[in-house]
Amino acid sequence: MPVTDVRTHRVRVPLHTPFVTAVRSTSQVEALLVEIRDEDGRSGWGEATENWRVTGSSIAGAEAAVAGPLAAAVTGSDPDDLEPATRALAATVTGNQAAVSAVDCALHDLAAARLGVPLGQLLGTTRRSVATDVTLAVDTPERMRDAARRRRAEGFTVLKVKLGRGEHDDLARLTEIAEAAGASTVLRVDANQGWTPKEAIRLVRAVEDRGLNVEFVEQPVAAGDIEGLAEVTHAVGLPVMADESVWSPRDALHLVRTRAVDLINVKLAKCGGLRAARHLVALAEASGVGVLFGSMMETHVGVAATAALAATASGGGPVADLDAAWWLTHSPVAGGPRYDGAALVLSDAPGLGITALADPAPALSPR
Ligand SMILES: [Mg+2]
């Protein structure tokens, strides 16, 4: 039953709260959903998000890559022959990881659907629930403190704190948040490349001196500054994570060889989908480097695929930063995952459990 059809759907979903980091501010998610159909009429779903500032991917670019070379690569292929089909994708285009990921995930979803099992089961686990943190968008210390209180009241015990807007203000923000959230709240700090190595070292040492309950510090310095990343990692006690510095397994290999980080953030939109992400996980595990499963600002479609992989990870370390779709006013699809407090719960239905575009259809881009 070969792949017969590759369709794309543009969706735009508003956020209930603006999402602000050191490098971007957004009030909606624009995404390209990819639907791959087989001869039996089954569908597999994947997602490419638009993110000019971090990944450089656009809806128009992803649409062109999917409708052109990526659709040509998978049409007529056997979706049950998943490994060769997804390997061929990676060799079809250079860059365009978000588009490659969308097609790769759609093929995985379709393969699981054809077997009649949830995607997580195809990847090797019966777990259907993944605990996630929730992000505190960068703001004034007072507003971040209030947001911390609200999120704690909603059941989140792990807060991802976006910093990187200035060393001294950042320490004030983090201290306010830690006091407001209480000692039992775990804080994850993400500077989104916002500090110099010296600033990062001073700030992390101050955090350690104050005894704040911080689990790790993510991407303290510029993405390309691997030496600076290693400098920070070696100078502080808290674990340091690479996000924007690691896209492919080859990037991860370089970080491992240079002992530049303790942890890596695996995102499908950076590495090109579940096949590459599994390679990243294997490389990290063999190297003693920890993994966090993260996402861009994505809808329920992209987040569900990452969660299925995150569910395969053993506990004991940071696992998932998958609150992206929690920020949306609604899902662009029917079926799929849902949030239950701090848990992202995957569907028990075959594949990702997505049955169709949401009805009524999400606001389509007027382009
Ligand atoms: Mg990050």
Image (cartoon, grey):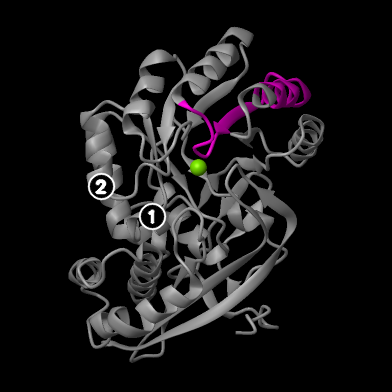
Q: Dot 2, how many residues are within 10 Å of its Cα: few (below 14), some (14-19), or many (20+)?
A: many
What is the CA distance from the residue labelled 1 to the residue labelled 2?
Answer: 10 Å
Q: Earlier in the sequence, mark 1 or mark 2?
A: 2
Disc 1 marks a residue whose amino acid type is: Lys
* 307 over 22 or under it: above or below: below
* Left or right of 51 on screen, residue 136: right
Instruction: Give the farthest residue toward the top.
Output: 209
Residue 177 painted magenta? yes
* 142 over 271 or under it: above or below: above
Task: Give the residue drawn at x 68%, y 38%.
Answer: 156
SS of the residue at dot 1? Answer: helix
Q: Classify residue 290 by image quadrant.
A: top left
Task: Give the residue drawn at x 39%, y 72%.
Answer: 106
Residue 276 painted magenta? no
Q: Read off the magenta span.
A: 171-196
Task: Give the residue drawn at x 49%, y 37%.
Answer: 193
* Left or right of 365 on screen, residue 64: left
SS of the residue at dot 2? Answer: helix
Task: Give the residue drawn at x 38%, y 55%.
Answer: 270
- Residue linked to disc 1: 270
Residue 366, x across and y down, in percent: 65, 84
Q: Nearer the viewer, residue 109 or 163?
A: 163
Disc 2 marks a residue whose amino acid type is: Pro
Residue 75, x across and y down, in percent: 27, 86
- Residue linked to disc 2: 249
* 161 over 18 or under it: above or below: above
